Amino acid sequence: MKNWKIVVSIGAVVLAVALLAVVSMLAPIGSGYYAKYLCSQLFVSGREDVERIVEEEIKPTNPLFGMVSHELDREEKTVRAVTLGLFSPTLAIYRPEVGCTLAVKVTREELMAQVQGLSFDRSVDPAEWPRGSSAPIADEATEAMDTLNLAEDLNPPVITRNGMTLSTRRLKQVLDWAFSEPEDGRRQTQAVVIVYRGKLIAERYADGFNKDTPVLGWSMSKTATATLAGMMVLDGKLDISESANVPEWEDDPERSAITTNDLLHMSSGLDFSEVYQPFNDAPEMLYNSADMAAYAASQSPAYVPGTRWYYSSGDTNLLARILRDLSGGTLVDVQSYARNRLFNELGMNTVYFEPDPSGTFVGSSYMYASARDWARLGLLLQNDGIWNGKRILPEGWVEYMRTPASDSDGQYGAQLWLNAGRDNEEVIPERRFQSLPKNMFYMSGYNGQNVVVLPDEELIVVRLGVTHDRNNWNIEKLVVGSLQALGLREYVESLD
């Protein structure tokens, strides 16, 4: 009996040690995600309710994050997170103009030195949207919806202007649905903006958000990265057909065959696991890496470049570092280029494109912008890269972004999602959104963030939020409802 108790005790100790060892390996991801996300929500988005952010947005992402606690310094604008009060204390630091960055293998002083002298003009133009901040049609629609009682009004208001007819009854229904909470989960919509024929016709925001709140787009950032690549092509700085400029591959014949075009189409052939769970490449790169492009560059080749499409944030972050180097090589250089050549041109004054510790903007994941500014990016693509009569993307670049990557079954182009399906009459087209046009294209983020562009209908729908269970959000319903409100689709009463 005594020997049995000893064996049990030893077994318990071994199990406890093993569990602690596993937690210690997972802790950098847990502490890193928690610190980075909370820092950005507070100091980039300007939100105040820490408890709500932690309980409704961070902890539901992964059970690991429930083991993490934090220390917040509002004066220094930092968040320090630690797992189980012991493992992997990680500091996220806010820096003016660029947002929050994890201090991974770098000091606070080194990070602050990277942004020395960086300053942007974020003044607002009072002109009508999209050039400026005025939105008369959206304001008129909001006023009509505020006075609309769906249960009593038999003849709800209809707005007609410049040949545009808008049913505020249907618009109210679809926006109410978008911001409602299902019984079996949390939808957590934060912002919706609808643009038709280049005009802002409707918008709504959750408590704590407004038309100027920068909101995380997650992987919608990839499309902004491809847009910047197009601008560098126009400027003669980049030839996408050439081998990707990755110093780590100079003496590697196999990986040096990867072109920038392969990276844009996520067809590098690198062995990268885009799985957002511990012990996978994506979270390891994002939350425990001092140089995300270097992490991606270290991955082994698994396929011949250009032959297999695989969604990879690693490919995008390699592209981001190439763009940084072409702009001058520093964080200040690339941030200034992006601001002066793209964001200022479009009037996107709320953008923060957050960098990693090495000074490369995290092209895969970390762009924050208001819903209106995300809509501006969509409008640029809808207009074939022309803004206010000026071409700021090469002729044919948007078509290039919209051309399906080889082996993607028509669902992905160059850092842009598609609804084309398979171009093979012998196979049933596998389009994700069957009720929406084949030529629709869209940006998509981790928690149900979307910018949907229907070029023929001249419609753009933006939805931002934090939906953890994808069954609780359906962007197709929001887009179809918007079409119905404009009389472009047969009216259906129910949104269920």
Image (spheres, rainbow, N blue to C red):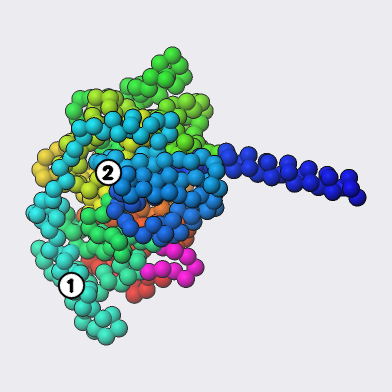
The residue shown at (78%, 43%) is 10
Instruction: Classify 10 Å Cα crowding around label 2: few (below 14), some (14-19), many (20 and above).
Output: many
Q: Position of residue 469 (x, y in %)?
A: 47, 58
The residue positioned 23% from the left and 29% from the top of the image is 333
The quadrant in which the C terminus is found is: bottom left
Residue 408 shows in the view: no
- Residue 422 in the image, given as x and y percentages of width and height: 42, 45
- Per the model, the C-alpha gap separating discs 2 and 1 is 31 Å
Q: Is residue 134 above or below residue 276?
A: below
- Which residue does the image show at 89% across and 45% down from the upper left? 3
Asked if one can make out residue 181 in the rendered structure from this viewpoint, the answer is yes
Residue 194 vs residue 136: left or right?
right
Residue bearing mark 2 = 352
Q: Is residue 142 left or right of residue 414?
A: left
Query: As rendered, which of 195 and 422 lies closer to the eye?
Result: 195
Q: Which is nearer the N-term, disc 2 or disc 1? A: 1
Q: Which residue is mark 1?
A: 143
**In magenta stretch: residue 149:** no
Q: Position of residue 494 (x, y in %)?
A: 37, 73
Q: Secondary structure at mark 1?
A: helix
> Would you identify the image quadrant in which residue 479 lies?
bottom left
Mark 2: amino acid: Tyr
SS at mark 2 in the image: strand
Q: State the predominant SS element of the stretch in magenta.
A: loop
Q: Which tag is nearer the camera, tag 2 or tag 1?
A: 2
Disc 1 residue crowd, few under 14, some 14–19, many 20+, Cα 10 Å: few
Closer to us: 175 or 8: 8
Residues in magenta, as a range: 180-187
Given the current orientation, which residue lies at the most extreme top position?
A: 251
Three-letter amino acid code of the residue under disc 1: Glu
Please say if 494 is above or below 437.
Answer: below
| Count of numbered circles in the view | 2
